[in-house]
Image (tube, helix red, strand yellow):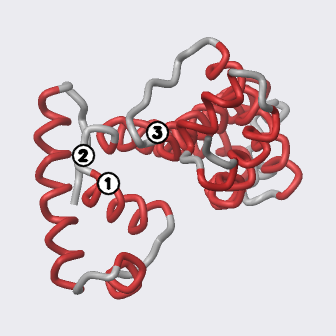
Amino acid sequence: MSTIKSMNDSELVQAYLDGNNRAFDEFLSRNQNKVFAYIISIVKDDDVANDLFQETFLRVVSKIHAHEYRESGKMLCWIMCIAHNVIVDHYRAQSAAFIVDGPKGNDLSNIKGDFMIGSNREVELSNLNTLRQVCVLMESLPAPQRQVVYMRYFQELSFKEIAEETHVSINTSLGRMRYALINMRRLSRQYGMNLCLE
């Protein structure tokens, strides 16, 4: 029988479903730093990030109990997609609650830059939707290609850093990214997604 530390994420999820709460603790400790780093990189606020992080793992637990995770070896990407959806929901709720009072009469001199915050939120939502679509496309990539896309775009590592982390040459890292982008472009056309992948 495997010890908790030696289990992979999918085994931990199954052990948790079988009633072993320590398995979920281990699962959380393995993934929490990357998930939180992703959330804080977008929302730029510790308190908001903590709230969204907790909401993310509440959804993860809920989806695990609903058997919505299928073994595919891509658990972290699955969690990141959930985190992304939590962030999108947060911005949608903020946008819906944001009402701007116009200036009194015809005096437009008091309008500040914040008056245009609604359009900025639309841009943020559009960017978040693009990230969600990229996450979906990443699910279909071979593991080495998925890894280099994640490290480049989500962790913002250079190709030199990626090469060092994955113990391959820079040319191999670049090649994997090239093939990943080719595959993602093909898949985006196949799924009717309007993405500009460069």
Q: From the viewer's perspective, is 27 left or right of 105?
A: left
Residue placed most toward the observer, 7 or 115: 7
Type of residue at label 2? Answer: Leu
Label 2 residue SS: loop
Image coordinates of residue 167 in percent, x first then y, are 33, 82
Q: Residue at x 73, y 46 (%)?
A: 28
Image coordinates of residue 123 in percent, x first then y, are 51, 44
Q: Residue at x 61, y 28 (%)?
A: 14
Type of residue at label 1? Answer: Arg
Type of residue at label 3? Answer: Ser
Quarter where residue 137 is shown: top left
Q: Are marks 2 and 1 in contact (CB under 8 Å)?
A: yes
On residue 146, the disc is 1
On residue 141, the disc is 2
Of all residues, the one furthest to the right in this rendering is 47
* N-term-proximal mark, 2 vs 3: 3
Label 3 residue SS: helix
Which quarter of the figure is the N terminus placed in?
Answer: top right
* Above or below 142: residue 169: below
Tag 2: Cα neighbours inside 10 Å, few (<14), some, or many (≥20)?
A: some
Tag 1: Cα neighbours inside 10 Å, few (<14), some, or many (≥20)?
A: many
* N-term-proximal mark, 3 vs 1: 3
**Residue 35 at least partly seen:** yes
* Residue matched to label 3: 126
**Residue 122 at least partly seen:** no
Residue placed most toward the observer, 91 or 161: 161
Q: CA distance from mark 3 to mark 1?
A: 22 Å
